[in-house]
Amino acid sequence: MMIGWIETLLDFDFDVVHIPGILNKLPDMLSRLYPPLQDSYKLVEDNVPSKLNNRNKKRVIAKRKKYSRDKIINVLATKLVETKNECTDYMTPPEEERDAILRETHSFGHYGYQAIVRGIHSRGMHWTNIYDEAKSIVSSCNECQKHNISKRGYHPLTNVMANRPFDHISIDLAGPLPVTDEGYLFLLVVTDICTKYVVIRALKNKQSDTIAKQLISIFGDYGFPRIIQSDNGTEFRNALMTSLSKNLGIDRRYSTAYHPQGNGSAEAS
């Protein structure tokens, strides 16, 4: 099969040019799309009518009888919708089943909340706050948030770049550790992204002024970095560190909360 493609390509005169994904958004996005769920879409549109046919009505009546026997929560509610002198019976399912119904309907094609509600209505069901619950399902769906780029834009993962030693460093704290005879309790870990060289300084506390003094000492030995990345700990993200970075022209970057992998170099060290 590959030979056939090679023969086809040889008929054309072209140059292969690399374009980064961030500059080639549409093709790069299309190459990551999940397979279209055409069969499921057809199931929703064609096989589930907007009005209840006889078979579905019998199914609804059977479920209504089943639910009506539950005298504790009284789960049955009937909503009549007048449409061309016809009426549609809506059944209210038990509260504990609603989340599963919403997720099942959403999984047919990962459509928006209005499509979810229409799909549930077409199955003869309705309940209070169904629209709000459908919105919650869509907003909490990882697949929808990952592939719906129309509002938020496309932001692919990028590598951390460092062009020279001590150009980009990662800092973190280790501790509290067993107290030494001199009273040291923490370790300041500074990792050079370019060379993976690690500098360690012992600290008696993790106050911002203590860390700032040690960083200035390290900068005197190795030079001033262009970028410093750290977690969001208060010992790193405070007025003193912000002022120090601003005066030295250092770009500060922070990893996301509860995600230590974002500052992996220092964490691993």
Image (spheres, helix red, strand yellow):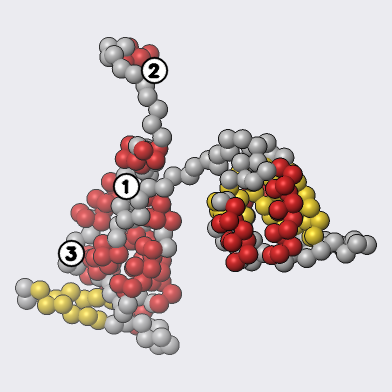
**Nearer the viewer's eye, disc 2 or disc 1?**
2
Distance from Cα at disc 3 to Cα at disc 1: 21 Å
Outermost right residue: 181
x and y, in percent, of residue 158 in the image:
49, 42
Confirm whether residue 109 shows in the render: no
x and y, in percent, of residue 223 in the image:
68, 43
Amino acid type indicated by mark 3: Ser
x and y, in percent, of residue 85 in the image:
6, 76
Residue positioned 17% across, 67% down in the render: 51
Residue tagged 2: 2
Q: Disc 3 or 2, which lies upstream in sequence?
A: 2
Residue positioned 35% across, 14% down in the render: 6
Q: Classify mark 1: residues with Cα within 10 Å, few (<14), some (14-19) or many (20+).
A: few
Element on which disc 1 rests: loop
Residue positioned 61% across, 35% down in the render: 164
Q: Disc 3 or 1, which lies upstream in sequence?
A: 1
Distance from Cα at disc 2 to Cα at disc 1: 28 Å
Q: Foreground: 89 or 132?
A: 132
Residue tagged 1: 37
